[in-house]
Image (cartoon, grey):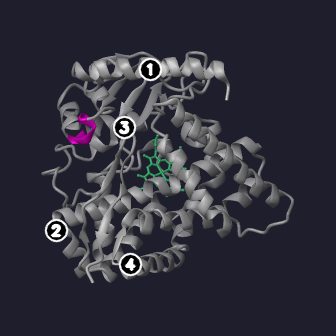
């Protein structure tokens, strides 16, 4: 590790943490989303943001939109990008470099504007079309059935480690072409990287993250080399496409890392959030048990509206834009609170109630919108539906146990532990 860099970053972190906390205490709702106790009830802050002016100018230096209409406008407007005009991290250093505290991992297309975004996304998009995804349904059902059967035998189990993580890991490893033998390491590194995605808050966390990224990149680049040398035959999976096309090593590895992270960090959150919301509400679980085939897709959409795993995204206008009654200067960071948008009463009646039978459930922004619309949306929906169907079929008397832990960050809303009783 570079000591000079670390001292500089450590000092910046201390200032950011201290300054942020002071502003949070002074009442800035956006900064409150970073700290306890406020972060434990983000919905109250989301409501405050929705009911106020759009955008809200946070004293932390960002603009924030939280209504469904304003969030949709920001993510769809092509005058905004995900990098500053100089090519840097929004809110980071002005010299156009990637800021290690705000953007600790190179997230490929997610952090690229056109034309690079268009070129790389086009390369892998064919693997994630609804038809190609549907072809993996059998594998998903087999995997989910095996995992849920094992959990039934255990009786008491943690949903996250027993089902919600291993299912999407197995599927994305298969899509990427990562052999079984590497899948465990893959999940371990993915978790380590995923934990730091919302921006790191300590030097230790940054080091842990950087180590995991180095190891993950080594795994991916080894697999790519084997493909290029023709020593391993895939079936047209992602690594094959990346090995065959004119893509630099760095680009290929970053894209593979993003697909891994996107592929399970978020979907595991969807499965956990859905089960918790159903069991806490009661009736939705019984409805799912009575008719899993009809119920599961509706539960998936309602969970994405009510408690989406990804809570916000950021954009920066590349030109001066009007937003609400404000004029926003180029390179100003604008946060779109996707989680808050899902509970906008202008779109959803009684938005704080979890109700899979509502007709507006699918009108959410959990997968964002515009050119960065989630590439894995069909896959996430399939995995969510399959996991919930298997659970409801094999554990009709499922109930919660004490000891759940929620990982709350500004970016992610998901359980890190969700103890359950299979109710045999
Ligand atoms: C419930 C599960 C998921 C949620 C909530 C989710 C959410 C999101 C969101 C909000 C974005 C866009 C961020 C922005 O606009 O800046 C995104 C992009 C992306 N997601 Fe997902 N995602 C999920 C599952 C997946 C899966 C299974 C994959 C699979 C491989 C995936 C791959 C991607 C990729 C590659 C992008 C970048 C697209 C681009 O920049 O063009 N996601 N996701």
Q: Is the magenta stretch mostly helix, strand or loop?
A: helix
Q: What stretch is highlighted in magenta?
A: 37-43
Is the residue marked by circle 1 packed among few (<14), some (14-19), or many (20+) residues within 10 Å?
few
Query: Is tag 4's residue or tag 1's residue first in the polypeptide sequence?
Result: 1
Task: Give residue 184's quadrant in the image.
Answer: bottom right
Distance from Cα at disc 2 to Cα at disc 1: 44 Å
Crowding near the residue tagged with mark 4, few <14, some 14–19, many ≥20 C-alpha atoms within 10 Å: few
- The crowding category of the residue bearing disc 2, from other C-alpha atoms within 10 Å (few below 14, some 14 to 19, many at least 20), is few
Whether the residues at callouts 2 and 1 have beta carbons within 8 Å, the answer is no
Dot 4 beta carbon under 8 Å from ligand 1: no
Q: Name the N-terminal-most of marks 2 and 1.
A: 1
**SS for dot 4:** helix
**Residue where numbered disc 1 is placed:** 14
Residue in the foreground of this view, choosing between 363 and 284: 284
Would you name the residue on which mark 3 appears?
410
Q: In which quarter of the image is residue 400?
A: bottom left
Q: Mark 2 points at which residue?
A: 282
Instruction: Work out how far the residue at label 4 is from the one at label 1, CA to CA, in angstroms.
Output: 45 Å
- Label 3 sits on a secondary structure element that is loop
């Amino acid at each position: 590790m570079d000591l000079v860099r670390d001292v500089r970053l450590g000092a910046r972190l201390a200032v950011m943490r201290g300054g942020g906390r002071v502003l949070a205490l002074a009442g800035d709702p956006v900064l409150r989303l970073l700290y306890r106790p406020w972060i434990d009830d983000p919905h109250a802050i989301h409501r405050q943001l929705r009911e106020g002016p759009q955008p809200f100018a946070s004293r932390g230096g960002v603009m924030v939109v939280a209504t469904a209409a304003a969030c949709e406008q920001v993510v769809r407007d092509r005058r905004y990008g995900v990098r500053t005009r100089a090519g840097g991290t929004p809110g980071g250093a002005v010299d156009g470099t990637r800021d290690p505290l705000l953007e600790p991992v190179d997230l490929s297309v997610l952090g690229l504007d056109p034309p690079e975004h268009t070129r790389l996304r086009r390369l892998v998009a064919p693997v994630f079309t609804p038809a190609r995804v549907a072809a993996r349904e059998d594998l998903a059902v087999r995997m989910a059935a095996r995992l849920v059967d094992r959990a039934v035998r255990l009786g008491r189990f943690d949903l996250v480690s027993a089902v919600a993580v291993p299912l999407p890991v197995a599927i994305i490893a298969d899509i990427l072409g990562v052999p079984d033998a590497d899948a465990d390491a893959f999940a371990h590194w993915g978790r380590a990287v995923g934990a730091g995605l919302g921006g790191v808050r300590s030097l230790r966390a940054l080091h842990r993250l950087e180590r995991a990224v180095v190891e993950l990149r080594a795994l991916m680049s080894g697999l790519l080399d084997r493909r290029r040398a023709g020593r391993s035959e895939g079936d047209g999976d992602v690594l094959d496409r990346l090995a065959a096309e004119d893509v630099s090593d760095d680009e290929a590895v970053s894209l593979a890392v993003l697909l891994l992270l996107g592929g399970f960090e978020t979907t595991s959150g969807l499965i956990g959030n859905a089960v918790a919301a159903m069991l806490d509400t009661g009736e939705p679980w019984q409805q799912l048990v009575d008719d899993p085939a009809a119920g599961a897709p509706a539960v998936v959409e309602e969970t994405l509206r009510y408690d989406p795993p990804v809570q916000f995204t950021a954009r920066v206008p590349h030109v001066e834009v009007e937003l609400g009654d404000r004029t926003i200067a180029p390179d100003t960071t604008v946060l779109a609170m996707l989680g808050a948008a899902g509970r906008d009463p202008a779109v959803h009646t009684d938005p704080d109630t979890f109700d899979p039978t509502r007709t507006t459930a699918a009108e959410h922004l959990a997968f964002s919108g515009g050119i960065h619309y989630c590439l894995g949306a069909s896959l996430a929906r399939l995995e969510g539906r399959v996991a919930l169907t298997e659970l409801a079929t094999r554990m009709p008397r499922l109930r919660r146990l004490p000891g759940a832990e929620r990982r709350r960050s500004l970016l992610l809303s998901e359980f890190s532990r969700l103890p359950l009783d299979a109710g045999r």
